[in-house]
Image: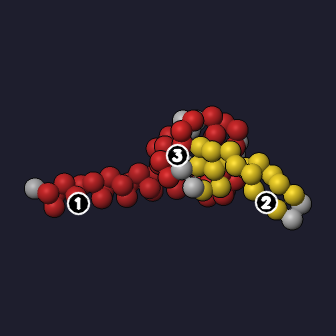
Amino acid sequence: MFLANDVRDWISHSNITMMMKSIDEEEKVLNNVYTLGGDQESWFITEDGIYELLMLSRKPIAKQWKRELSYLRKVALLFVL
């Protein structure tokens, strides 16, 4: 599980509310996080949720990830053949 705010920063998404709406319910979890200021509710995203965000995104980091994934699929296909 990954903290949604960290994921937002990583992919440079400008609107966390819209980002979270684009993820299926089973790919996100709202949990309490214990901080010095007290308990805070924070969203967490599963690994599948991150993949979904990257596939939907047009950000440069997502495009790079898609290219690398495509390359890995081609290499895996050649290995199987």
Residue situated in front as seen by the camera: 23 or 75: 23
Name the mark nearer the viewer: 3 or 1.
Answer: 3
Q: Which mark is residue 75?
A: 1
* Residue 71 visible in image: yes
The amino acid on which the numbered mark 1 sits, given as a three-letter code, is Val
* Residue 58 visible in image: no
Label 3 CA crowd tier, 10 Å (few <14, some 14–19, many 20+): many
Report which residue position mark 2 lands on: 34
Q: Residue at x 53, y 39 (%)?
A: 26
Q: Quick one: SS at disc 1?
A: helix
Report, in whole angstroms, how far the alpha carbon at label 3 lies from the one at label 1. Answer: 25 Å
Residue 72 point in image, percent of width and height:
30, 58
Q: Quadrant of the N terminus?
A: bottom right
Report, in whole angstroms, how far the alpha carbon at label 3 lies from the one at label 2. Answer: 23 Å
Report which residue position mark 3 lands on: 49
In the rendered image, the residue lying farthest to the left is: 81
The amino acid on which the numbered mark 2 sits, given as a three-letter code, is Tyr
Label 2 CA crowd tier, 10 Å (few <14, some 14–19, many 20+): few
